[in-house]
Image (spheres, grey):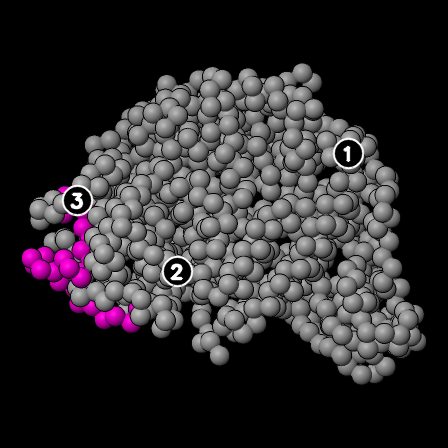
Amino acid sequence: MLPNETGLDGWLRYAALPDEFVSLRPRYSTIIPLADNQNSPIFTAARELQLGLSKILGQNISLETKLLGSAANSSIIVGTVKTFLSTNQDIHGALSLKEDGYCLVCKDGRAAEIIGQNDRGALYGAFEFLRLLSQNQPLPEMRISNPSAPIRWVNQWDNLDGSIERGYAGPSIFFAGGYVLDDLARVQQYARLLASVGLNGLIVNNVNSNYNLLNPTNMQGLARIADIMRPWGVRIGISLYFDTPKDLGGLQTSDPLDRDVIAWWEGITSELYRHVPDMLGYLIKANSEGQPGPLTYGRTLADGANLFARALRPHGDGVVVYRAFVYNHHLDESDWKNDRANAAVEYFDGLDTQFEDNVIVQIKYGPIDFQIREPPSPLLAHLRKTPIILELQVTQEYLGQQDHVVYLPPLWKTIFNFDLLVDGQQSLVRDIVSGQRFNWSRSGYAAVVNVGNDPSWLGSHLAMANLYAYGLCTWDPQQSEVDIIQGWAQLTFGLNKTVVDTITNISMASWSTYEDYSGNLGIQTLCDIVTHCHYGPSPAAQDGNGWGQWTRADAHSIGMDRTTATGTGNAGQYPQMVADRFECIDTTPDELLLWFHHVPYTHRLKSGKTVIQHFYDAHYAGALVAQTFPQQWETLRGLIDDDRFHHIAFRLQYQAGHALVWRDSINNFYYAKCGVKDEHNRVGNHAWRIEAEDMILQGYKVVSVTPFEAASGGKAIATIPGAGVGTATCTVAFPSGTYNVAINYYDHLGGRSQYQVFFNGRQIGAWAGDLQEKLSHDFSDRIDGHSATRITFNGVEVKEGDSLKITGRPDGNELAPIDYVSFLPQGVVD
Ligand code: GCU
């Protein structure tokens, strides 16, 4: 049996290679770091090589700090171009390296030279060397590798109180109770993971920042974080709260042109640099979602950004990263010209030449907010002088929150490879981001990351593939997403082909599967955006509020008209050739149809299907694929350690159930809305279901569910408050046979109900409403699409006429709610 693993080392487990492979590898004699400073990433690289070689190959190799004449025959030397040159080594190949790049030279397969363009590059080269060994790949005679862009950062979502904005994996590893944590051991381990995939910067705190970050105690804390990350080549920056001068500094205003405000920020910035001399700079979220900003004081966004840019200038290469996520969240939906997707271009147009040269604009990949499918933000085509950072997310906020597997690189690729055709010339988003298209020297990538204290970091082992892939994609956005997931699976779970193939299959199918059952044709992720959860289905929640994530669904038609001719004009924000394509229904790809056009449900797609039939079919197809995930995973039993096997099996099983909740909610909602029948007559017809409200109830009562589509038939049952245990009974009218018995119920915050299920008095199963302790997404506190879930008891022998009884013991506010029971013959999904 394989020893259990917690996931703490992520993809850096350095599992021992099988003996037959080890025997083919050279024996290294020494590891020689060419560096004087023990805190240098070069030393970190040397220690990491030492650790990796001992674990992967079983070689215990000493570190030598001096390069002796004969050492080179079987030693691994790690250093920078500069330190190699100072030892008179021939490093011809490495002379053309770009910032952070490395050159890996493996001579006769016996010795190795790892030459970084800088300290970080040396560390990245060492990690690549260890990755190749772990994957049992041949070592290259010479490999030169350069990152696509200089900025490859993560943005933490951590709050000072220790919570994480949308953290699904326990409390912060950085903060608790208003301060930086004393014990930063996890920060060290995190820095190692980031460095291993070439990530070189981290913004420590949530963009929804708190002025107390800048109190003296926290400044010292930031210094400790920076000290811990520095040996891993990860520099830190911070998110600022715009009104800090008023709220912490006691000034009358935070007006960016006010002299006292300017002086205050200069003082704070100097103080910060005393603590963190290599600080990256500031990330600013302002005039967004209720936050104050320069517009609050009648100034421009450029005035706001330049305030910080000037304060940073005396202190080296610090930059202000100003987020383009500026929009009005009280938008009037009754005006068909209003469009949140227009906001970024409207706010930033005309400012391109107004920013100081150490300002970078950070743009989310799509115009709205990390939806399942978006076109690239049009702002990516508007800034020529001001460099940009492309903001991605590892957090899966609208993408199943790490309890549904969604491997993100296939989505990211739709953005990276999109040709914006600026000025009629090829302008791939990845070339704009790299700086190549507009000759920027500092631009790149940021991803919002929500690692927490959970040993698995993200609350789900499979979700870690996205963090790994993010690093690799920023290094080379053209790398194949299949190669990335295969490599990750090998490092995380071992070299067994079945394991690697299964993880690859599930992962590669995961994004399109989630799109199929969550929101099609560019309508966005149809989750509940109102109750804060952004998780379960609630299509009506998109409309009727000021957030601007509208679908404009009525009884006849659906979609945002973003054309210039009749709609919001958003299509016209793209360069002409792209604008022309999106302006016209015929040239808009089906997958973005409803993003750009408002059409009848009966509109025919290029595929030949109507919009509504596509919705129905896609939801059935996606939910069906999700049912295969746990089955595929089951083939890995015994091939990976039990703990991680069960952790993932549980989540995939949960996902399969919740995919059905999604399928039925969305289909029932649109069927009720437009009345157009499913050609295959599936929607609303469930041959194998018994509705709980049709059972004989004792201590239970029928409740109407809001939104109605979150319950089969719009109704569920819940125990009567104060009545104690409830029972629901019925006689089974299905033919005798073997069934998988699935029970859909609701598991929300506020209690831990207990359930039991009996046939003819014989108990066949029991469970508790305790998902909030086992899963990590945002939970709601009521019966809805977030809490709807399913448990299945497989292979139950049932006779026609048997009596079925379910008992529910309520707990706290959770009244043991049940939606329906399905009797599923083998192979049937309902
Ligand atoms: C989304 C998200 C917020 C987050 C915001 C941002 O709106 O729901 O939690 O703060 O994006 O990126 O600023």
Residue 635 lies left or right of residue 709; in this view the side is left
| Residue located farthest toward the bottom when viewing the structure as drawn | 762
Q: Is residue 76 magenta?
A: yes
Query: Is the shortest distance between ligand 1 and the CB of mark 2 under 8 Å?
Result: no
Q: Secondary structure at mark 3?
A: loop
In the image, what residue occupies the spot 20% across and 58% down?
111
Q: Which mark is residue 385?
A: none
Residue 598 higher or lower than 414, as above or below: above
The magenta stretch spans which residues? 57-84
Q: In this figure, which residue is indicated by the disc labeled 1?
A: 608
Residue 315 higher or lower than 512, as above or below: above
Inspect this view and state whether residue 229 appears.
no
In the image, what residue occupies the spot 62% across and 24% down?
582
Towards the viewer: 670 or 428? 428
Give the mark nearest the N terminus, 2 or 3: 3
Q: Which mark is residue 135?
A: 2
Amino acid at the residue labelled 1 = Gly
